[in-house]
Amino acid sequence: MKKAWPILVVDDEEVMSESMAAWLREDGYRVDTASNGQAALQLAKATDYAISFIDLKMPGGMDGIETMMEMRRLRPDASIIIITAYATVDTAIQAMKEGAQEYIVKPCHPQEISMLVSRILKLKKLQSENTILRKKISRKYKHHDIITKNPRMEEILALTQEIASLRSTVLICGESGTGKELIARAIHYSGARADKPFVSVSCAALTETLLESELFGHEKGSFTGAEGQTKGKFELADGGTIFLDEIGDISPKLQADLLRVLQERRFYRVGGSDEVSVDVRVIAATNKDLPAEVKDGRFRDDLYYRLNVIEIRIPPLRERREDIPLLAEHFVQNIASELGKDISGISGDALKVLIAYGWPGNVRELENVIERAIVTARNGVLEEADFGWLTQRGSAGQNWDVPDVPLSELERRAIIAVLERKRGNVKEAAASLGIDRSTLYDKLKRYEIAH
C-alpha cells in the first residue's frame, strides 16, 4: 500500500535530500528529489505527490514558501512539510499561514520522519475513503438534489417520475422546511418541460395587489408607478412550470382569478383588456390543512379540487430520521466548502444528538443548525459539544427511558398515549403530535389503532 504514495523531497543540500529519500525508500515509499523550486514544480506537474518535503532556504530566486505556494496552485490538496535549519516563530507562522501542514527543524531524525509520514498518509487514506463513500451515498440516495433512503420519500420520488410529463396540476403538502420546492423541481426537470422555464412564486410574501401583479403582470398606468407593460410569472413560465408556494395564504379574490386560469389557461394583466393565453403546468404547495381551510370557509372548495388533481404529502423530518445522517453529512460537505472551513465530517455522538432532536423546522432547520456548528467548530470533525446549545431547547437530550423496540413501535405507542390524553379527539392529537389530521389517520390505519 505504501508504494502507492509518491513523496517528493526538495532541498539544495544533496546530502540532506538523499539521506531523507533513503530513509523513506526503506519504509517502502516511492521518492523523487529536486534541488530547487523550479525543478520541484516540474516534477509536481507530472506527479500528484502525497507529501512534499520542502527546504525553507534555497538558492535560485525561489525559496521554500514560494515553492509551496506555487505547488498548491498546481495541487490544491497537496500535503507540504517545510523543513529548515533556521527555526523562528515568524517563519513557522508564515509557513503554516501559507498552507504548510507541518513545520520541522533540521537535523531530521529517521524515526520522526517515518512517524510523521505515517500519520499524514493515514489521514489521507481516511479522507480518500470518506470521499469514495460520499460519492457512493450520493449516487444511491440522491435524486434531483433530494437525499433520502426513507421508503415513503422513495415512493414520492418514484411518483415524480411517473407524473413528470403530464400536464395535471399537483398539490404538494407538508410542513415548512420539508423540501416542497425540491419535489416540484424534481417533477419539472424529469419531464418534457425540463428545457422550459421553472418559475417559483411565494404567495405568502406579497400583499394581494402586489401578488396579483406578480402573477399576471400589468399594463402601463394600471397603478401608481406602473411605467410600462410587465409580464407576470404565468407568462414567464409559458411552456414550463409555475410553482405557487404557500397557496393556502392567497386572498379570496386571487383564489377566484387562479381558478379561472386553471380552468381556461387564460387571464388578463392588471389594467389590461386583452386576454393572455399560456401553456403552463401548475404545481402548488402548502403547509396548511386545506380541507380544514375549505370547511372553515377560508379556501374555495372548487379551487382546492382543481389544485388537488395529484396530491403529494411530504413527511416531516422527525418521521424519516434515517435521513438525518445522510442530510447532515451532505450539509457538512457543502457548507464547509462554501465557508472555507476544514471540517471533514460529523461524529457518531453528534449524530445521536441530531437524530434525537424533534426538528420542528425540518430539513431547513437541520441545514441552519449544521451551518452554525461549522462556524463555531474548533476541530476538524463536528462533535456532540458543537450541538450542546441544541439540546437545551428541550426537544433533544431528554432523559427518557426508551424501550428497546423498533421505531415504528415507539411511534405506535406515542400515538395511543396522545389519543388517550386527548380522549380520542383526532384533531387535538394531531396538533399535539405536530402532524396534520390526514397523516394521523394514515398512521391509525397503518398501526390498526381504534379511535
Image (cartoon, rainbow, N blue to C red):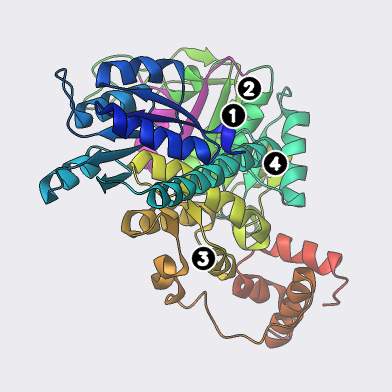
**Disc 4 and disc 3: Cα gap in Å?**
40 Å
- Describe the element under mark 3 as helix, strand or loop: helix
Quadrant of residue 94 within the rendered picture: top left
In reply to whether residue 215 is colored magenta, the answer given is yes
CB under 8 Å between callouts 1 and 2? yes
Residue behind mark 4: 308
The disc, 3 or 1, on the residue closer to the chain's N-terminal end is: 1
Q: Quadrant where the C terminus lies?
A: bottom right
The disc, 1 or 4, on the residue closer to the chain's N-terminal end is: 1
**Disc 4 and disc 2: Cα gap in Å?**
17 Å
Name, please, the residue furthest toward the front. Answer: 15
The disc, 4 or 3, on the residue closer to the chain's N-terminal end is: 4
**Disc 3 and disc 2: Cα gap in Å?**
53 Å
Question: Hey, what amino acid is under mark 4?
Answer: Asn
Task: Nearest to the eye among marks 3 and 1: give it.
Answer: 3
In reply to whether residue 123 is colored magenta, the answer given is no
Residue 445, numbered label: none
The boundaries of the magenta stretch are: 194-218
Nearer-the-camera pick, 368 or 437: 368
Residue 211 visible in rendering? no
Residue behind mark 3: 350
**Left or right: 222, with 245 as reference point:** left
Residue 260, numbered label: 1
Residue 264, numbered label: 2
Question: Hey, what amino acid is under mark 1?
Answer: Arg
**Left or right: 181, with 201 as reference point:** right
Tell me if mark 4 has few (under 14), some (14-19) or many (20+) residues whose alpha carbon lies within 10 angstroms of its own.
some
Task: Nearest to the eye among marks 3 and 2: give it.
Answer: 3
**Disc 1 and disc 2: Cα gap in Å?**
6 Å
